[in-house]
Amino acid sequence: MKKILMMVAAAMMAAMNVSAQRLQVVDSDGQGIPLVSILTEDGNYIGKTDLDGVIADVKGAAKVALTHVAYKPQLVTVASLSNGRVVMEDLNFGIAEIVITPKPYIYVEDFYRVYVYRNDSLCFFRSGIMPNAYDPQKKKLEQGSYYQAYAEHCQKMGPAATWFVRSKDLGAGKVAIGSLQKIEERMKDKYYVTTADKGANHKTYSNSKGIVGQLVGTANQMRMTLDAGKMQMYANEVKGEKKLLEKRKEMDYDYQYTRIYADNEEKDYDITSFIMESDHWEYNDKKSHVKFIIENYATDHYYMNKEEWKAKKKEMKETYGSSVSLDKIEEYATSHNIPALSSSTRQAIKKLRQW
């Protein structure tokens, strides 16, 4: 009987441990934070939170590192949490308001980081600074150079080169352009998404299968998070695009992003109010499951003319060149109030090889 009781107790403890693996990550107001990356102490990827800030299972990790583009990173001991609830501290990262002057370009300096995980292990990392000039009249964005980028990889040059190119194509260093109104119109027309007001500075976005995103106002910012993968696959289904839908299902395709703008009375969010964003892709390729994460921070906004734009590009190249170190890039991040890389991510990067 004693042996049976011990076995029952062990089973109950195991069940408790399993249930304790669920976490909910919230802000200081108790609002769930979506797209928080959950890592192990040594930088392996566990998963990300959903629109309610929940991750169902941290896979037995005793400690987890939490990172998000808009919050300060932290390391927490899972067993010490009350009901699996974690409060993240807002980064309060922002930009000075642009003073309108009679110059044709809006200059936006952008800091970015790119992470690629294969089967949960960091396999590629890249970080750098990108100067951008936007012409509001022509609605055209002109980018500077990627020479200042810093990159590391853990495989042969071929795959690493592919990720290097993909990180450009998928948005590293590219600021977001497009007003909230246009984004919502596109979601409605192309992805059959409806908008619902849930109170002051809070909207949800849904299709017939459920909620696929939200817009939350906080600290003079508007933060939009969308499950773009669900939106795309629902549109495939409605339009009868069976082959594309099946391919995405087969790939276990997932694409979500958070985009953050400075709030204003007109509720018009464009390049002048863009602050930061984080994009998350996941899919299966022929070898493994891949997770691709890009973070962007707009560090400077001001007006300039064509000559000043040329001079700025030259200055950036002379300052950072093609062999800038991670330490120098991180000094830039610190000076612009961007959260430092977590110790977990630093550990994972140390295992990689320089480009």
Image: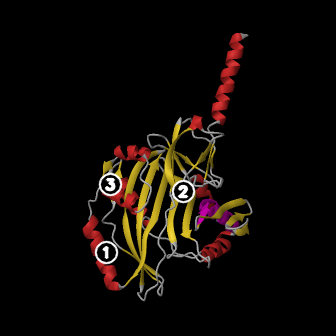
Callout 3: SS:
helix
- Relative placement, left or right, of 332 versus 39 is left
Q: Is residue 352 above or below residue 259?
A: above
Q: Is residue 230 magenta?
A: yes
Q: Nearer the viewer, mark 2 or mark 3?
A: 2
Residue 339 visible in the displayed image: yes
- Quadrant occupied by the N terminus: top right
Residue 240 visible in the displayed image: no
**Which kind of residue does numbered mark 2 sit on?**
Asp
Badge 3: how crowded within 10 Å, few (<14), some, or many (20+)? some
Q: Is residue 331 above or below residue 305?
A: above
Q: Position of residue 195 (x, y in %)?
A: 71, 69
Given the current orientation, which residue lies at the most extreme top position? 1
Badge 2: how crowded within 10 Å, few (<14), some, or many (20+)? some
Callout 2: SS:
loop
Image quadrant assignment for residue 179: bottom right
Q: Is residue 186 above or below residue 125?
A: below
SS majority, magenta: helix
* Mark 3, residue position: 326
CA distance for labels 1 and 2: 32 Å
Q: Is residue 256 magenta?
A: no
* Mark 1, residue position: 313
Look at the image and give the residue range highlighted in magenta. 222-239
**Which kind of residue does numbered mark 3 sit on?**
Leu
